[in-house]
Image (cartoon, rainbow, N blue to C red):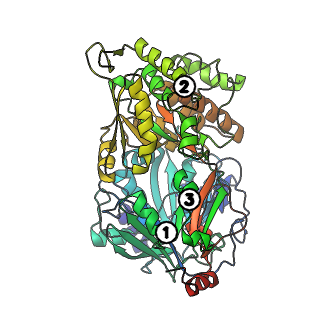
Amino acid sequence: MRHAARLATLLLGIAVVPAWAQDAASDPTVIKTHGIATFGDPVLPADFPHLPYVNPDAPKGGEMSQHGIGTFDSYNPYTFRGRATAPSVMMLEPLMESVLDDPYSMYCLLCETVEYPESRDWIIFNLRPEARFSDGSPLTADDVLFTFELLRDKGFPSYSEALRTRVAGATVLDTHRIRFDFMPDIERRDVLGLMGNQSIFSRAEFEATGRDIQQTSTTPFLGSGPYMFDSADFGRSITMRRNPDYWGKDLPINQGRHNFDTLKFEYFGDFDAAFEAFKAGIYTFRVEPSEQLWSTGYDFPAVAAGAVVKEEIPDGVIASGDAWVFNLRREKFQDIRVREAIGLMFNFEWSNQALFYGMNTRLDSFWDNSDLQAEGPPTPEELALLEPVAADLPPGILTDDPVTTPVSGERQLDRGNARRAAALLDEAGWATGTDGIRRNAAGQTLRVEFLDFNQSYDRIVNPYVENLRAIGVDAVLSRVDPSELTTRTRSHDFDIVRDSLGNGYGIGGGTAQAFGSEHSDDVFNPMGLANPAIDRLIEIGSAASTLEENTLAIRALDRALRSLRFWIPQWYKPVHTVAYWDVYDRPDSLPPYGLGVTDFWWYDQPRADELRAAGQLR
């Protein structure tokens, strides 16, 4: 129908403009702008010369190389099938770009401007005519429409549902203009960002290759971004190359960014092999996840010679929410007393001193490392949100401080917490047998399997397992390869698995994916949480129209989520622990919400030449 109408217009030789398009052009309430903000106006003006945190004169050149663990068998991360490589979508660009110093603003990238009414009932993207895919073909409104329809119909279920339930339709207005109309009676705050954040595929490439977004693929995407696929040793390494003909290299938003000629990602079978490869200079930039290695492993000659730099860089991002997560789909974990008892037996204080070298801070909140986390008893404003839903939350939600993680003593087994945990399990009907193992009335043992693939976690989980076994829990650690872990978590075949439940700076679709009842069978809701109180608080938070309302809603939701004890919070470092061969440089002042290594760091060629002349660098 769309193509027939377009043909009729051409044959008649007239321009048919819908009435609503004419109204949009003349309506003074329509906002035409270079950026959007969740609350208020975007921070940067329309004529900003570059992002505040970049060096606009950063040199181009060199290679940034990093590592991954395991392997990959696909270049398509838009399907649950297979294991996609990390830079699979690096060549794709979104319509609008998020920035690292303001979590509430987005700015035009593929678009020149956007237009929308104060009601946010619709949005028009005015695309840049010069935008091109890396093969030189133009990126048009038809590609935007194709991408939207593809992900709406065949994307991840949770994302496609977000599009189907929020977007009433899309209309190509001309080659470089597309309009999205939103469903009536939905919250409008985040719908502009939902569409602005959409990366764009090439319709022509999909049709020429017969690509199926729901299947694995060994063919990289064609994108419009600054980097394009260069080469790969399939399953072992992949190299991305900066496109010298990148259409957007002169845009203000891109000044001082995308500085490396190549980005290389090397894959290793385990963490030990990856560290040894870094020491040998096989790759040159490493975010160090192991406190033990950070404290004791960086004594190799290149560090002593100054060829490798160690830095602790402040991290202002909301903590990642790393935790062991209960599978609430399993009956044994549906009793909150069982979950609380198991959580009591992880001794963070002992672990931090004995294993983490005192480097970590215990997580308490789903919004830790920010001012959004709940603290103290509920305020009157929080109570106004919590009282209507309190019946679906544990007692104390209206009076007590938010649930915090237990404090343990210096010994691995904290006897006070062990007694509390044992009493909770007794109350829950898990009695200790003559063999010391707890069983329920049906004779089933309280078996708890921790599922993981990272051997560096063995030294953390095994003492935890010992503590649980000391109170009669039949606890085990099962270490599997990354592929099996992926398969089992996607099919909900686990007891407890490690995941990240961190959040963003607003409540929206991602929050609903992670914690909402409608997504309780989704991979993004690993615990299978389904609670009407949580659903209602997500609705309230999604409707927040001011920063103050947003903060209030998040604190109430944080308090409610913590009360349900479906996670065993782990820890975080308020710094990035990074090590790199001394061939990189960056601005003196980094943005608070991202490290930006592949974004705006650059290669120091003179320093690299010095290290090579000294025999330090490969």
Left or right of residue 298, residue 84 in this image: left
User: Residue 541, how many percent across, how many down?
Assistant: 59, 35
Dot 2 or dot 3: first in sequence order is 3
Mark 2 and mark 3 in contact? Answer it, CB < 8 Å: no
Please report the residue visible at 62 percent of the width from the left and 25 percent of the height from the top.
Answer: 385
Please report the residue visible at 51 percent of the width from the left and 32 percent of the height from the top.
Answer: 412
Q: Is residue 188 visible?
A: yes
Judge the density around disc 1: few (<14), some (14-19), many (≥20) Cα neighbours within 10 Å.
many
Dot 3 or dot 1: first in sequence order is 3
Amino acid on which disc 2 is placed: Ser
Q: Provide the residue designation for mark 1.
A: 279
Label 1 – label 2 distance at C-alpha: 44 Å
Q: Provide the residue designation for mark 3.
A: 124
Amino acid on which disc 1 is placed: Lys
Disc 3 secondary structure class: strand
Disc 1 secondary structure class: helix
Q: Tell me, for residue 563, which label it has, or none.
A: 2
Disc 2 secondary structure class: helix
Judge the density around disc 2: few (<14), some (14-19), many (≥20) Cα neighbours within 10 Å.
some
